[in-house]
Amino acid sequence: MKKILYLILLLPFFSLQSCVEDEKDIFDASAAERIAAAMKEYRATLAAAENGWLLAYYPEKNHSIGGYNMMAKFTAEGNVTLSSEVATRNYEAGDTLTSQYDVISDMGPVLTFNTYNEILHHFTEPNGSSDVDGMAGDYEFVFMEVTPGKIILKGKKYDNKLVMIRLEEPTDPKAYYASIAAMEESASFGNYFFRVNGDSVSMAVLSDRVLNIAYEQFDESGDVVVQEEGLAFTFTPTGIKLYEPFVYTKDLRSNSQVKMENFDWNDEAVTFTCTDAGVDAEFEAYLPEGYRFYRDFIGTYTMKYSGNKTTEITISEKVNKKSFTAAGGTLDYPFEFGFDLANGTITLGFQKFLAELGSNQYMGIAMWDSNKGYVTFVDGGLIGVCTEEGGQLTINFKDNKLWPGYIVDGFIYWKFDGSGSSIGSGGGRFYEITLTKK
């Protein structure tokens, strides 16, 4: 009886020992097994997106220039086809290039683009011996979160977040990036008013793809401190998406916080409006005094020039929000006015291939300092100064101050050869130009 009782008393000890040993074996084995299982799962998730993934790729340390859109389509065999909204040395925006990828173990699962792909490595290559980081982009990423529709990774070297969203429909890269370019063109203003809940918070200065703000905040003691933030973003076809949600807190003594991430662009109101549920926040473009919208310039004008000479010309749309065509009157050939979206005015610079004359000659225009008698084919040009009186728009053209030592006050029709080299004067001369809209 004593022996039986002794064995019964020992049974829990043996069972405990057995459990400890089994759990130790399972734990030791499962660390490696879990990584291997995760790698297998992540490869399958990457390849399962038959239409590929949309990437928000952020180069530069601390994402200091903002992000760019890319697309990636992975196969189970280890191939990846990439495209980008950024043109590279040999590829235009939307061109595709296939290389290889892998999911490897390096203190956890890592996505590596392990063969050269110019579209991606444009962001990662050194820019000469004096700038070994180049654009400081990553090509290896640590998996942070994986679902069938969204993958979040972190750059292994520079720590920037990479978000990949599964594309549910076939998406043409060139058309998609064209919509991104159009969105960026529409919203290319230098400064914005930043408002939250109707209150003015800060001026926001746009630099690359970062909105830089500085705002006052009450700290826990009630003292006013100035907070500075750089809100990096990527463009979407309808607006912008911040690198990460921005949490605005006016007073740290209260629990009042406003969290924002997604904004849509309103072209008429020139405003980015937050689309996150329950959030009232916006960035409204600052328009300088005298600002005119693109379509304000389309119409018929009396052009006064070269003293008291006058003629009638028309300005028509060439590329919306980018350029116009000027033609008619005593103009020898139609030429192009540029549109300065940030300042709301028109500009004129040198142009080479306005018309083909034959014998490998082309007509263009050269910017002219009529007082010194010199022309330039570089940066010098004219910028319009707009005024309005009695509802009548008047544009006086002034030197853009980009030709040191000279003052541009007009232009001359000028001949160029097929390579763009100057041949000589080829037509009319116009200076001291004023346009008055009819």
Image (cartoon, rainbow, N blue to C red):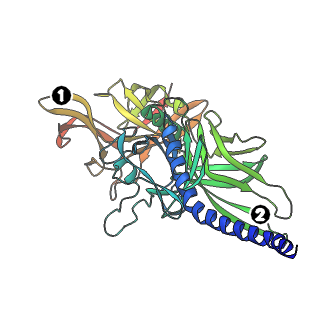
Q: Residues within 10 Å of mark 1 (few under 14, many from 20)?
A: few
Residue 404 as seen in the image, left or right of residue 288? left
> Looking at the rendering, which quadrant does residue 337 occupy?
top left
Residue 77's disc is none
182 is higher (above) or lower (below) than 299: below
- Can residue 432 be seen here? no
Picture residue at 42% right of the left edge, 59% below the top? 135
Q: Nearer the viewer, mark 1 or mark 2?
A: 2
* Residue 357 marker: 1
Residue at mark 1 to residue at mark 2: CA–CA distance: 65 Å
Q: Position of residue 307 (x, y in %)?
A: 37, 38
Q: Is residue 419 or residue 134 the one in the foreground?
A: 134
User: Looking at the image, is 339 positioned above or below residue 11?
Assistant: above
Residue 233 x/y as whole percent = 57, 50
Residue 133, compared with residue 190, is above or below; it is below
Which one is earlier in the sequence, the residue at label 1 or at label 2? 2
**Which quarter of the picture shows residue 164?**
top right
The residue beneath circle 2 is 217
Instruction: Quarter of the image for the N terminus: give it.
Output: bottom right
Q: Amino acid at mark 2?
A: Gln
* Image position, residue 244 (x, y; %): 63, 53
Is residue 93 visible to the viewer in this orientation of the structure?
yes
